[in-house]
Amino acid sequence: MQWGRCTVQPKASTAGRALPRHPAQTAGGRLWLYAVGDVNGRVLLTHMGKYQAKVAADHILGRDVAIAAPVPRVIFTDPQVAAVGLTEAQATEQGMDVRAVSVPTGSVAAASIHGDDFVGTSQLVVDAAREVVVGATFTGPGVSELLHSATVAIVGEVPLATLRHAVPSFPTLSEAWLNLLEATQHTDDSFLCDGKEMTDCGSS
């Protein structure tokens, strides 16, 4: 690659694997070139390009940037398709003990706002060993607004037992989270509310 009078030979680096860059080395071996956004060929999404620019700036300033961010992605069709993190197949390929739960997105009260023909599915992929969400997919009208909550849960590695106390407001599509987390209880009996079974929580 010709840049002014310099010839740049991008070279992969084993240091800082999470960095969104193809560092080029000068004769002295110093890393000085960062490729962010579409030019690095990693994730061709505007929001990830913006994130990569922040990571590159942090690395230049000597800050810790050793984090591999999951990629949130949305297909703005009708209905929408929104996903972040790993699919069930990808998680299995990585050797995780995986369980996936899915519920109809339209099973919440907010679906009636969108009309009687609301269709869609919401799914979580759970790492059973750690009891954390590693992937999420939502389909249906307006589900792109559900995606960031899933991204936060994945990045923060928030345990399912903690997520169950994040109460979604009524009537919003975010109640899909309530249904999803209840679905995980079919294989997890550990959820208690003030020492009671969940079915008794509303009776006190």
Image (cartoon, rainbow, N blue to C red):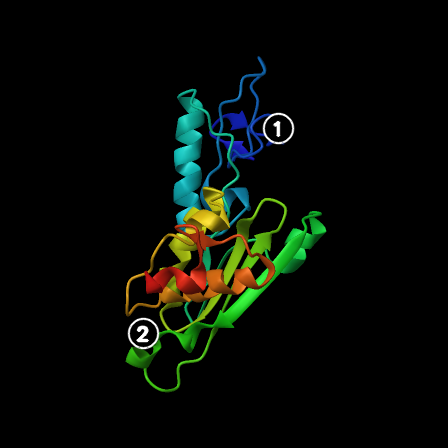
Residue carrying label 2: 110
User: Measuring 67% from the left and 58% from the top, which residue is drawn there?
Assistant: 89
- Residue neighbourhood size for the residue with mark 2, other residues' Cα within 10 Å, grouped as few (<14), some (14–19), many (≥20): some
Label whose residue precedes the other's in the sequence (2 or 1): 1
Report which quarter residue 56 is drawn in. top left
Residue carrying label 1: 13
Q: Amino acid at mark 1?
A: Ser
Q: Secondary structure at mark 2?
A: helix
Label placed on residue 155: none
User: Measuring 41% from the left and 76% from the top, which residue is drawn there?
Assistant: 106
- Residue neighbourhood size for the residue with mark 1, other residues' Cα within 10 Å, grouped as few (<14), some (14–19), many (≥20): few
Residue 78 visible, this orientation: no
Q: Quadrant of the N terminus?
A: top right
Q: Residue furthest bottom?
A: 116
Residue 180 position (above or below residue 31): below
Marks 2 and 1 sit apart, C-alpha to C-alpha, by 48 Å
Which sits in the foreground, 164 or 55? 164
Q: Residue furthest front?
A: 204
Report which quarter residue 74 is drawn in. bottom left
User: Measuring 68% from the left and 51% from the top, which residue is drawn there?
Assistant: 97
Q: Amino acid at mark 2?
A: Ala
Which sits in the foreground, 76 or 162? 162
Question: Percent from the top left, x then y, of residue 203?
Answer: 34, 64
Q: Secondary structure at mark 1?
A: loop
Q: Quadrant of the C terminus?
A: bottom left
Which sits in the foreground, 25 or 52? 52
Circle 2 or circle 1, nearest the eye? 2
Question: Percent from the top left, x then y, of residue 150?
Answer: 44, 54
Residue 175 position (above or below residue 78): above
Question: Percent from the top left, x then y, of residue 197?
Answer: 46, 58
User: Measuring 30% from the left and 68% from the top, which residue is drawn there?
Assistant: 172
